[in-house]
Amino acid sequence: MTNNSSLSVIPVIAIDGPSASGKGTVAQLVAEKLNFHYLDSGALYRIVAFAAYKNNIQWNAADKLGELAKSLKIQFNQNEIYLDGDRITEAVRSEEMSRGASEVAIHQPVRSALLDLQHSFRQAPGLVGDGRDMGSVIFKDAMLKIFLTASVQIRAERRYKQLMNKGLSANYEKILADLQSRDERDSQRSAAPLIQTADALLLETSECSIEQAVQFVLNAYQKHQ
């Protein structure tokens, strides 16, 4: 079982926050600094959205999506993502699959199907997980919970620059509107809504560098130890 005594002693740092807040980058760097395992929970929902797209399953078909999620053979290797043995890293990182992830994540059958998979990432010496419900649902007993956020305008600007630097076409106003709709969907959904739990530390990164954010989390971890 996931919450038995042997697993509960393995430390978890849970970093939650809205889309494009930088939590993934921060979580991955913290994991590297501490030599912990890393869980990008958002990637799991991107994979479900991608698999649904490939199998002609609508992103609003909750029960079909739940069954699909149970059947997926997902593998993470370094920064690469594999589905049923096929490398799909770039495909699931697209803006379309990012939107799809937010849409499939509202469905309880999908979240339930992915629960055990997320728990399996909790391995010694520790885990850093980022997402929307790491601290509120998946790892309620996390030793450290961080709610990492930034203004939606700053997040849209960061996403715009990120896409432009990759040589991809991008429209700031479209990105801003998309993030605003995702924020509303993520915070108002009935299944594991995006919230800052009472025991989570707030990390506002609108005027904060990645290095400063990483150091904030590392300092908080040292205090919690």
Image (cartoon, grey):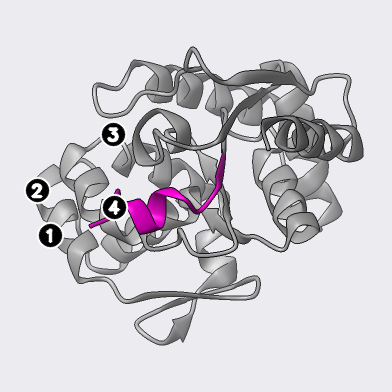
Asked if the residue under mark 2 is in contact with the one under mark 1, i.e. CB atoms within 8 Å, the reply is yes
Question: In whole angstroms, how far apart are the C-alphas of marks 2 and 3?
Answer: 12 Å
What residue is pinned by disc 1?
A: 67
Give the SS element for disc 2: helix
Of marks 4 and 2, the one in the foreground = 4
How far apart are labels 4 and 1 at the CA level? 27 Å
Q: Nearer the viewer, residue 22 or 57?
A: 22
Residue 4's disc is: 4
Mark 3 vs 4: CB contact within 8 A: no
Q: Residue at x 41, y 25 (%)?
A: 186
Residue interval drawn in magenta: 1-13
Instruction: State which quarter of the image contains the C terminus.
Output: top right
Neighbor class of circle 1 (other Cα within 10 Å; few <14, some 14-19, many 20+) is few
- Judging by the rendered image, the residue that carries numbered circle 2 is 63
For marks 4 and 2, the one nearer the N-term is 4
Secondary structure of residue under mark 1: helix
What amino acid is found at the position of numbered circle 3 in the picture?
A: Ile
**Which residue is label 3 attached to?**
106
